[in-house]
Image (spheres, rainbow, N blue to C red):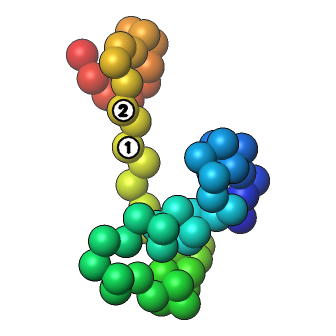
């Protein structure tokens, strides 16, 4: 699922999946792949997620579309 949207970006950074990226950067060693996968699937299926855009600058059309001034 995430491979369709993020595959190229993950591969460019040396990861096969979001799960692989998180596991590789887990500083506490507490990452549970099964729990993560189940949670990600459930949140995406139910639409329980938040999209965060981080931009240096944004065109006025985008700001207006997202409800800014």
Quadrant assignment, res 9: top right
Q: Is residue 61 above or below residue 43?
A: above
Count neighbours of disc 2 (C-alpha within 10 A) and say few if under 14, some if 14 to 19, many if 20 or more: few
Count neighbours of disc 1 (C-alpha within 10 A) and say few if under 14, some if 14 to 19, many if 20 or more: few
Mark 1 vs 2: CB contact within 8 A: yes
Q: CA distance from mark 1 to mark 2?
A: 6 Å
User: Where in the figure is residue 59, as x and y percent of width and height?
Assistant: 42, 10
State the residue at coordinates (72%, 58%). 3
State the residue at coordinates (52%, 62%). 21
Residue, disc 2: 54
Residue, disc 1: 52
Q: Is residue 26 above or below residue 59?
A: below
Label count reads 2
Q: Quadrant of the N terminus?
A: bottom right
User: Where in the figure is residue 69, as x and y percent of width and height?
Assistant: 24, 16
State the residue at coordinates (34%, 18%). 56
- Closest to the observer, 10 or 36: 10
State whether residue 6 appears in this view: no
Q: Is residue 68 above or below residue 59?
A: below
């Amino acid at each position: 699922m995430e491979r369709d949207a993020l595959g190229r970006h993950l591969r460019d950074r040396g990861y096969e999946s979001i799960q692989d990226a998180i596991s590789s950067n887990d500083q506490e060693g507490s990452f549970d792949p099964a729990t993560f996968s189940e949670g990600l699937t459930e949140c995406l299926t139910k639409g329980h997620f938040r999209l965060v855009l981080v931009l240096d600058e944004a065109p006025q059309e985008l700001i207006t579309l997202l409800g800014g001034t």
